[in-house]
Amino acid sequence: MYSKISPCIVEEQHVFVDGKSTVTNLCTFLQYASEVIDDHGQVDVLYTDISKAFDRIDHGILLRKLQDIGFSDYQRKLYVLQRQHVQSMSR
């Protein structure tokens, strides 16, 4: 699955990338913000949590779209299993 999405991942991406996390994102941001503020600049930031969006999405449509762009049956099953795991852990 990674080979399908890796061309779309920018260097600044921290979530779902090996060796990076929300903690590394925060450290990177704090370093950047500190440098800008030290130079008397301004930093504006907006963090959003879109996890709830996946609770409202029509997963049938999403799975069809994944198929349309070339995700295999196995890759789509992995998505479904991962979503079931996340949902069971959040209860």
Image: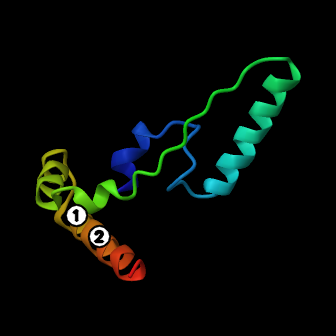
Q: Given the current orientation, which residue lies at the most extreme right position?
A: 38
Instruction: Report the side of 78 relative to 11 (left or right).
Output: left
Q: At x 82% / y 32%, what residue is drawn? A: 34
Q: Residues within 10 Å of mark 1 (few under 14, many from 20)?
A: some
Quadrant of the image occupied by residue 55 = bottom left
Instruction: Report the side of 12 relative to 16 (left or right).
Output: right
Disc 2 to disc 1, C-alpha distance = 5 Å
> Which quadrant does the N terminus fall into?
bottom left
- Position of residue 2 measured from the top left corner of the image (x, y, whole percent): 40, 54
Q: Given the current orientation, which residue lies at the most extreme top position?
A: 40
Q: From the viewer's perspective, is residue 84 above or below residue 27?
A: below
Q: Residues within 10 Å of mark 2 (few under 14, many from 20)?
A: few
Q: From the viewer's perspective, is residue 49 above or below residue 40?
A: below
Instruction: Report the side of 87 relative to 38 (left or right).
Output: left
The amino acid marked with disc number 1 is Arg
Residue receiving disc 1: 76
Residues at discs 2 and 1 in contact (Cβ within 8 Å): yes
> Which quadrant does the C terminus fall into?
bottom left
Quadrant of the image occupied by residue 21 = bottom right
